[in-house]
Every structure is written in C-alpha cells, then in structure tokens.
Image (cartoon, helix red, strand yellow):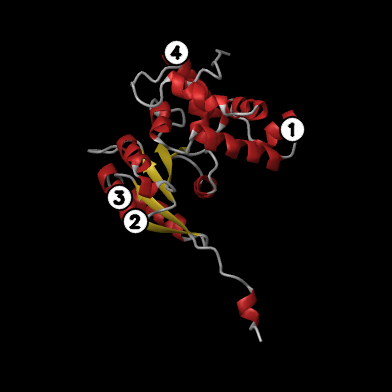
Amino acid sequence: MTKPEETLGTPEAPIKVLLADDQALLRSAFRVLVDSEPDMEVVGEAADGAEAVELARATAPDVVLMDIRMPGTDGLAATRMISADPALAAVRVVMLTTFEVDEYVVQALRAGASGFLGKGAEPDELLNAIRIAHAGEALLSPTATKGLIATFLAQGGSSGEGEGPDSAEYAERLAALTVREREVLVLVAGGHSNDRIAERLAVSPLTVKTHVNRAMAKVAARDRAQLVVIAYESGLVRPRAE
C-alpha cells in the first residue's frame, strides 16, 4: 500500500543563485534576502568576474546576479565567458546596474545577459527578477527597452564590434520564421509583454508564449532578451525616434 507521503511528489529544487559584486556589504545584503526565500538559495559569492565564472562552473547556478562594473574581469566579460561555455547553457545572468538605462545595456545583451536590475530596486523586485530569469523570461522593463532602442538609434543599429552573425546568417535564421512568429518577434522587440501581445493579436497568452519559444529556437536566441537584440541587429525592426 502506498504511504500518503509518497503520493505528494518530489518538491521542486530551490533556485540556485550566484552573487557577483565587488562590494562585500551588498553581497551580504543580497545573500540574506535570497536565503530568506524558501524557493531559492545562494550557492556562491564572487568579488569579480573571473571568480564569478569559476564559481559558475563549480556550482552550476540557475541565475547569476552580476554587477556590470567590477575591478579586473568585469561583468560584461564574465557574462560572455558564461554564455560561451556549453556546460553553462542553462545559466541565466541578470545584470546589476547603478542606473536602469546603462551605457552597457546593449553590450550586456549581446554578451548573453537575460536582463537588468537597478541596484536601487526594492527587495521584492530583486526576488521577482530572479524568478523571472529562472523561468526563461526577459527582464527588460519599458524603461530599459527604451534605453536599448535609443542606443541602437545612436549606433545606427550596428553592433560596431564585428562580432556575432552577419546579415546573411540573420536573413537565413529569420527566413525560418512563420508570418505570425515574425509578427510576435516585432512586438517583443517593442517591449510588449505576452499578455499585451495576446490582446493585440486576439490570441491567448499561452499561444504567444509558444510563438516566442519557437522564434527563439529558430533564431538561436538564448532567451527573450536576445530576441530583442536580434530583431534590431537583423534589421527586422527599425528603431524610430519618438
């Protein structure tokens, strides 16, 4: 006979969080906050980017809270290394910034970051950001998205770094999208949530999520945040000054 407790199933493992910031006091505050939640735990602390990469490989975190500006190896370089490591493909990086619209926003997204969080965010916002990133969603607020578009306007939509796929490869990837997937991608690039896109297209949020996931797979985007970058860098979406 099956015991009652055996029918309850296995509880979900807590979200593993790695903290990377050169300020020990800030890391301590984040640790206390994260460890106070039953669904997450801190698995390591790093004082610079090189240590963050080393600890990511040792602990396989689900989410890394990564400060952009750190001495030595900064958050951008560390994010690139994490994104380039096949063994860390499931790791999501949330960049911590002093200002939400940061000069490094575009660079960080190209490096593989899933989104941004201001250091002045409320505790609930930080915890929610961890859960959103872990779920594979983009952490791009309307303010951050506008900052991203403004940067593309200033750069003429070009990376200026000579990295990443060329226009021919982008064209090949986008050719695999259906008409509806392209439509959804354009709306994602506009900073709209799944619920908002669903309203505009008169479909369910679940249908939108399915289109987003298929688009990510076809254009080889790690997550929703990179879809925004691809939409602009491919020329599918042309930024306009307001």
In the image, is 79 to the left or to the right of 63? left
Q: Which residue is mark 4?
A: 156
**Which numbered tag is attached to residue 44?**
2
* Marker count (numbered): 4
SS label for mark 3: strand
C-alpha distance separating marks 2 and 4? 40 Å
| On-image quarter of the C terminus | top right
Mark 1 or 3: the one toward you: 1
C-alpha distance separating marks 4 and 1? 31 Å
C-alpha distance separating marks 1 and 2? 41 Å
Residue type at tag 4: Gly
C-alpha distance separating marks 1 and 3? 42 Å
SS label for mark 1: helix
Q: Which residue is mark 3?
A: 46
Q: Contact, CB < 8 Å: mark 4 with mark 1?
A: no
SS label for mark 2: strand
Closer to the camera in the image, 174 or 25: 174
